Image: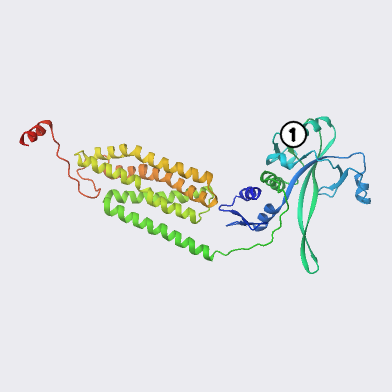
Amino acid sequence: MTILRNRVNELGISEAVVTQQGADQIAIDLPGIQDPAQAKDIIGKTATLEFHFVDTTNDSQQAAMTGIIPVGDLLAFNDQRQPFLLKQEVVLDGSSITHAASNFGDQGAEVNIRLSGGTAVSAFNRMTAENIGKLLATVYVETRPVERVVDDKTVTRYKTEKRVINVATITTALGNSFRITGMNDIASASHLALLLRAGALPVPIHIVQERTIGPSLGQQNIDTGLLSVELGFCAVVLFMALYYRGFGLMADMALGMNLLLVVAIMSLLGAVLTLPGIAGMVLTVGMAVDANVLIFERIREELRLGVSPQLAIFTGYQRAFVTIVDANVTTLIVAIILFSLGSGIVKSFAITLAIGLLTSMLTAILGTRVLVNLVYGRRTIKHLSIGITVKPIKKRYPRDAANSSQET
């Protein structure tokens, strides 16, 4: 299941789910898949690599024609059906490969291989050092399911095929990194690198059932989710406009820009907006105005203390900034933990939430400040449209306090 998850991740599909069903079955859900044939080809291949020394003492053409294979050898062909006699001993297999990447080098398409440490790699280094000048073959091993009808029943058998990818002369001892050349094209190299990165399946698998679910139910859920975003947005916009008046309208404009930025960033990242993602957007709508509420209430406090409107605006944004950053950073930490430890569904929610937090800080602090400066900046004002009427608190001086105590 771990290897299958890795292969699904290599497909770049969001919200893929790999679950166990029963004792010997695995269900894989791939939402939004564009090429099911490619997905099945990558997921179902029991593919790995093996490295064999080439037997140059016997005639491979004759062995291919007669079918008589020398003891200790095996017969394999390349894509051009050219036969090769290989030593049966496996010098190195794909279990030692930790990373593979395709590239286009001087000799055409190639795959760069990086190996892990351990005894197998040490033995590979020693054996190549002892056989400098000999031929080493890179063999692609794949197990295919073959269905046959026996007594009116379909029986699945598995056939292992070995195909020679590359034959090269050993010029130096091979270490932890080397490359495989002679690939047909860059697409073949990329495909091989993907399978090697994801890991070789330890057992062959067979696709027993394939279903394509139509979008009717999913479309209904999406419509309901988008309706929840719209209703939440309208409710927040109405509340802010009624409670904070002019400043509330500025917060509403920043909220609309916030939603636009969230969708734009997700589009740039190529993310799929799923139902958990929509839930993250609904939460973002509710949380995005928190910063503005803190700023506006701070401005009200300054006005109650008798501070001038311009100074109240400056102080409100300045003193509320630290509180806003603290509140958003703690929530962002939780989103990061959800993304790192959660499954695909939780990750989608965490990504949307994190993006919404970052954009809300930008729009709520910088966006509304630009609008406030545009309306109230560079002129003398006596009143701010910030909701309820605030009355300055009467300043009490020491002498007034003393008189009050004597009267008491």
Residue in view at x 27 percent, y 52 percent: 243
**Towards the viewer: 253 or 280:** 280
Q: Position of residue 153 (x, y in %)?
A: 77, 67
Residue in view at x 42 percent, y 45 percent: 357
Q: Would you say 322 lies left or right of 149 here?
A: left
**Towards the viewer: 236 or 347:** 347
What residue occupies the far bottom of the structure in this picture? 152
- Determine which quarter of the picture holds residue 101: top right
Q: Secondary structure at mark 1?
A: helix
Q: Position of residue 85 (x, y in %)?
A: 87, 44
**Towards the viewer: 305 or 331:** 331
Amino acid type shown at disc 1: Thr
The residue tagged 1 is 119
- Determine which quarter of the picture holds residue 111: top right
Q: Inspect this view and state whether residue 83 appears.
A: no
Badge 1: how crowded within 10 Å, few (<14), some, or many (20+)?
A: few
Q: Position of residue 314 (x, y in %)?
A: 28, 38
Q: Inspect this view and state whether residue 247 appears.
A: yes
Residue in view at x 31 percent, y 37 percent: 319
- Determine which quarter of the picture holds residue 24: bottom right
Residue in view at x 45 percent, y 52 percent: 280
